[in-house]
Image (cartoon, rainbow, N blue to C red):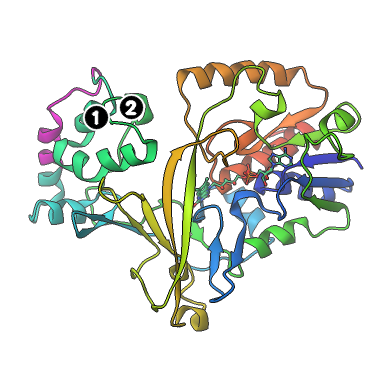
């Protein structure tokens, strides 16, 4: 073996694929029973509908290198992501745009009129002196829109009163003064035609790659554990950086999600793939209805059942799946301390969202793995 990759998410598989293509023998281990990390998806058994087990994943990128690379393993559908939100029993388009504003104020404002209205409403607080998330949010979009679409939704995501949330969690809130309600602004967008898992499996399908599932890097009874491999073989580690150092500098904090999946005896539950619920009287933040991600799969799409998933958000405990970095000042200090420790490790390369404690979209995880490969392994540079 020339390289050990810990974690079979997009970061780990991109490194493994590049290394294998360059003739190196790679072993990939993952503690889960399946490959793919959080992008993994599977067919729901009653309906055949593809379900994203760790939350909805939409691929989008404006990076030509990443786009060219991912197209080696999959084609993409022409799916365009749009999100709606149900506030006080009425459905509005998201992100907040001219359509949302005019529906909310029962008006027909032009872009300039809407901008002037929001500016006037936002004058209640100054962004520079805002004391917390609530004041900052009002300073950005004005009280009416903030309270309807951002305040309680964010409070539910963080399980924290908006007065107590730091203003640092937002630098801007998305408002568009056109009717464009495409969720992403990237050059390319779509879903893998035959699913995420087929794409991920193709990345790992190489004679030089061996994948071992159900193997935890910190389980001393496994041959490929940390103390048996560090210093013996180059390691790319994509698990949580604090876990690697046994939490020596404290645990970094994360938010996690709980998912409640249900098969319903109806052909179409909500008419769209994602509906947000920004009000406090609804405990979940969103409902995903997976068949709407693939309307082109006609037989499955037209079936008389559907699969929905309600999403609940909360702070993660150590045993929960870490999803979104909380990034408090203490977390930032801890991360710096872990980066220092990482420099002292012998040929261990930390990458991916867990290894760097950063939220990374899939295209970012793939792009940063391609850079790591070029800069730290291939002998080429950017
Ligand atoms: P990832 O977490 O996928 O993989 C890490 C792997 O390491 C896991 O398989 C884990 O089991 C393994 N591992 C950890 N510790 C280990 C140990 N001790 N031993 C062995 N293995 C270990 N992106 C996007 O572009 N569009 C989207 O719509 C979304 N949506 C989305 C929703 C939600 C809820 C989340 C949390 C994330 C997204 N993402 C996303 C981001 C996407 O999930 C992310 O870019 C990839 O998961 C990053 O891949 P990584 O390989 O970095 O981590």
Seen from the viewer's position, the closer of residues 281 and 48 is 281
Q: Secondary structure at mark 1?
A: helix
Answer yes or no: do the residues labelled 2 and 1 have beta carbons within 8 Å?
yes
Instruction: Give the number of callouts.
Output: 2
User: Which residue is label 1 attached to?
Assistant: 134
Is 382 rendered above or below residue 270? Answer: above
Q: CA distance from mark 2 to mark 1?
A: 8 Å
Between 96 and 338, the one lying in front of the other is 338
The residue pinned by badge 2 equals: 165
Answer few, some or many: residues within 10 Å of disc 2's Cα (few below 14, many 20 plus, some between 14 and 19): some
Which residue appears at 65% of the width and 62% of the height?
197
Q: Does the rendering let one see residue 379?
A: no
Position in image of residue 30 (x %, y %)? 74, 46
Side (left or right) of 33 relative to 312? right
Relative side of 327 to 87, left or right: right
User: How far from the left and from the top, in percent, is residue 337?
Assistant: 62, 15
In magenta, the rendered stretch is: 115-129
- Using the image as rendered, state which of residue 70 and residue 195 is in the foreground: 195
């Amino acid at each position: 073996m020339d390289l050990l990759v810990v974690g079979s998410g997009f970061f780990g598989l991109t490194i493994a694929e590049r290394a294998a293509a360059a003739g190196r023998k790679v072993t990939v281990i993952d503690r889960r029973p399946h490959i793919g990390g959080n992008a993994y998806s599977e067919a729901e058994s009653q309906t055949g509908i593809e379900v994203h087990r760790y939350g909805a994943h939409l691929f989008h990128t404006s990076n030509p290198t990443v786009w060219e690379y991912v197209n080696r393993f999959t084609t993409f559908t022409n799916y365009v992501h749009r999100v709606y939100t149900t506030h006080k029993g009425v459905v509005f388009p998201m992100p907040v745009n001219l359509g949302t504003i005019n529906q909310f104020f029962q008006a027909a404002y032009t872009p300039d009129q809407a901008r002037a209205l929001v500016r006037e409403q936002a004058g209640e607080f100054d962004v520079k002196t805002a004391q917390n998330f609530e004041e900052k949010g009002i300073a950005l979009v004005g009280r009416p829109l903030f309270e309807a679409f951002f305040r309680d939704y964010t409070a539910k995501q963080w399980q924290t009163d908006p007065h107590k949330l730091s203003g640092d969690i937002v630098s801007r809130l998305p408002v568009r003064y056109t009717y464009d309600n495409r969720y992403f602004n990237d050059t390319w967008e779509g879903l893998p035609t035959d699913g995420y898992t087929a794409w991920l499996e193709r990345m790992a399908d190489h004679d030089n790659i061996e994948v071992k599932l159900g193997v935890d890097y910190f389980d001393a009874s496994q041959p490929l554990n940390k103390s048996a491999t560090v210093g013996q073989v180059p390691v790319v580690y994509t698990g949580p950086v604090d876990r690697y150092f046994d939490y020596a500098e404290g645990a970094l904090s994360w938010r996690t999600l709980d998912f409640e999946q249900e098969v319903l005896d109806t052909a179409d539950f909500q008419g769209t793939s994602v509906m947000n619920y920004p009000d406090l009287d609804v405990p979940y933040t969103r409902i995903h209805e997976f068949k709407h991600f693939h309307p082109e799969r006609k037989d499955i799409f037209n079936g008389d059942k559907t699969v929905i998933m309600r999403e609940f958000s909360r702070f993660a405990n150590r045993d929960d799946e870490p999803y979104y970095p909380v990034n408090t000042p203490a977390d930032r200090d801890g991360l710096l301390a872990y980066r220092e420790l990482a420099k002292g490790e012998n040929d261990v390369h930390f990458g991916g969202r867990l290894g760097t404690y950063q939220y990374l979209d899939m295209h970012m995880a793939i792009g940063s793995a391609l850079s790591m490969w070029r800069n730290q392994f291939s002998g080429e540079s950017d």
